[in-house]
Image: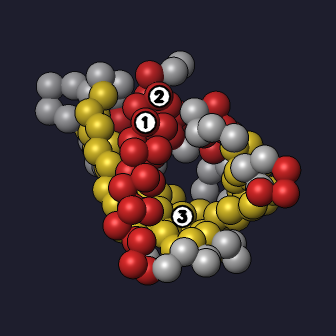
Amino acid sequence: MALFVVWRDSVLGAGEAWRRLTAWERHADVVPLTRITVVEGTGGGVGTVFVARSGVGALAFDDPMEVAVWRPPLGGQAGFCRLVKRGTFVTGWAEIEVRPRVGGGSRVVWREELRVRGVPRILDSLVGWVARWVFGRAVRRLLARP
């Protein structure tokens, strides 16, 4: 499995950063060739299930995810969300932490461990590097867009 971590500081408060990062459908605006559909729940909270459909035509795949932990930032405490990837092609988990910064703004930490079916483990470091680049760019863009 490839493990990667992305962190970004933002001028946004923790609540607003959280809102932007956990509005799952918005991820489709910043991740190329992807659309997101919430299929169970309202989008926020434990038990929410959404599917990221990535690719084009016959080369597309579904990446279903379920929210396993949901603790929005509150009263100066960090927010934390854990997603479990339930697909047959991509498995693993992702964690999103949004922490208020002293003096204002927030720090976002995105941790993810993923396994891509059919990709040899010897390529895990390459998968991690690509994923870190893609998700780092996505987090930056999500935080920049209202």
Residue at horizontal 39 percent and vertical 62 percent from the top: 126
x and y, in percent, of residue 129 in the image: 36, 55
Q: Which residue is mark 1?
A: 137
Cα–Cα span, label 2 and label 3: 20 Å
Query: Which percent across, then down, holds residue 32?
Result: 63, 38
**x and y percentages locating residue 45 in the rendered image:** 60, 56
Q: Amino acid at mark 2?
A: Arg
- The answer to whether any part of residue 42 appears in the image is no
Residue bearing mark 3 = 83
Q: CA distance from mark 3 to mark 1?
A: 19 Å
Q: Is residue 101 left or right of residue 68?
A: left
From the viewer's side, name the closer residue of 64 and 60: 60
> Where, by quadrant of the figure, is residue 123 drawn?
bottom left
Residue 89, picture quadrant = bottom right
Name the residue nearer the viewer: 89 or 66: 89
Indicate which label's residue lies in the foreground, 1 or 2: 1
Under circle 3, the secondary element is strand
Type of residue at label 1?
A: Arg
Mark 3 or 1, nearer chain start: 3
The residue where tag 2 is placed is 141
Chosen colour scheme: secondary structure
Q: Going by the image, does 88 lie left or right of 85? A: right
Position of 134 with respect to 32 (left or right) is: left
Relative to residue 112, is residue 105 depicted above or below? above
Q: Quadrant of the N terminus?
A: bottom left
Few, some or many residues within 10 Å of mark 1 (<14, 14–19, 20+): some
